[in-house]
Amino acid sequence: MSGKPTIIVESSHDTPLVWFDVSIRGGAAADPRGLEGLHRHVALLARRGAGRRDRAELDETLDNIGAAIDVGVSRDAVTLSGLALSRHMDAVIDIAADILAEPRWSEDEHARLHRETPQVLDEIRDDDSALATRWFDWVCTPGHAYGRTSLGTEDSISRIQRPDAIDVWRREVTADNIVIGLAGDVDDATSARIVTRLLERIPGASTGEPAPDVYPDVARPAGRRLILVDKPDRTQAQLRIGHLSIRYGDPDTAAIAIAEAVFGGMFSSRLMQEIRVKRGWSYGAGCALRRSRQPHWFEIWTAAGIDVAGPAVELILQLFAEFSAAGPTDDEVDFARSYLIGAMPFHVATARQRMQLAVRDAVFDLPAGYTSRLPEALAALSADDVRAACRRCFDPHSAITVAVTTADSARPALEAAGAGALTVVDHDEY
């Protein structure tokens, strides 16, 4: 093993617990075209048996010592996460090392995932909120790597073969492509031993063909668009409005954090006050810039009764246009900055939280300590800085709106909302 991984250690000896995250750069954005869902499939398959243990034996071993190992897939990474009592950490690390170096690639588990994943897709289609997000991701910026589903579609799932999974794992699970985070009851010597055991059986660097560029330069589509996802018998409309914006780590990141707090990140935000407090159209409304390695969406969300869905979209677009042009007031900036700086200690209160933020920063190729130093960046901003960032990063004239609701009932009012050309699609079409 010659490659150099990124290692992050946050020690805390208050309790005899150790957490670890092993993040493998790549993630769903790196799924080949037509094989969407591949990284999710390979991560779950690797976890379902490794080394001398099949899935049942692996799970039983962890259960017997009260430990856990899970896998997660984001747009930018596959992460193997674990938790164990300090006295059992070596045994858990042995299992994690097996998963990294020697997955069994069980034919039975591969076939089982082919059966299970479409059921998960059905569950998403039953969940209007999840369905709205799935459609918004897909249609927001066609061609963007983040627009493709991490779960997959029926067609893409059916095309995933075991050799595809094995190839991805062998290409990406290399020491120089890994970020390891450790937190809790670990010292320097223990950390060094854990890292060595995790990496000693995997290559230092990939020796296969390089993966294709997974982040093509895709421009934000011009003009407003409205996608009505038709689902029968709805009483509400799940709404998503937004567009492609900046990456987390862009020079405007801190300013946009203040802007999103003012516009939709607090109970006193403009969206909450206009949508919930003044009109009672929804229980809540919010917005956020998606945190990712590459430029991602700025997204506004709410759920409104089907009878007010059209007026809600019209109002949100109006508020967004006004906010993009004029930005927040001086008082709003001061309040939001105070709120964000005051909330930061809650996000870094534990060793595990600090480790996970640092791992995310490393996966995003940001300087060490980037997120933990955001309060300094927030404090240095003027209201004019925030207003200028709003003008640079927000484009209400290119906003896309996704509404999951019943077309027969909601279409006339949505067409009148000024959200652009309307397209109606069936809810299970994607």
Image: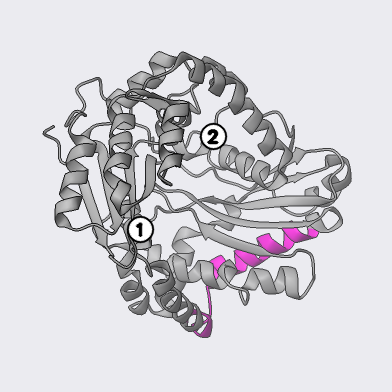
Residue that protrudes farthest toward the bottom in the picture: 331
Residue 120, x across and y down, in percent: 63, 33
Name which quarter of the figure residue 92 lies in. top left
Looking at marks 2 and 1 on the same chain, the residue that comes earlier in the sequence is marked by 2
Label 2 Cα neighbours within 10 Å, binned few <14 / some 14-19 / many ≥20: some
**Figure quadrant of the C terminus:** top right
Residue 375, x across and y down, in percent: 35, 74
The residue at which mark 1 appears reads as: 357
Nearest the viewer among 140 and 172 is: 172
Does the segment drawn in magenta span residue 316?
Answer: yes
Span colored in magenta: 311-333
The residue at which mark 2 appears reads as: 149
Helix, strand or loop at mark 2: loop
Residue at position x 33%, y 23% in the image: 52
Name which quarter of the figure residue 27 lies in. top left
Residue 189 placement, left or right of 269 = left
Nearest the viewer among 217 and 182 is: 182
Does the segment drawn in magenta span residue 84?
Answer: no
Residue 139 placement, left or right of 104 = right
Residue that protrudes farthest toward the left in the picture: 2
Q: Main secondary structure of the magenta part?
A: helix
Residue 76, x across and y down, in percent: 39, 41
- Looking at numbered disc 1 in the image, what kind of residue is underneath it? Leu
Disc nearest the viewer among 2 and 1: 1
Numbered badge on residue 310 = none
- Looking at numbered disc 2 in the image, what kind of residue is underneath it? Thr
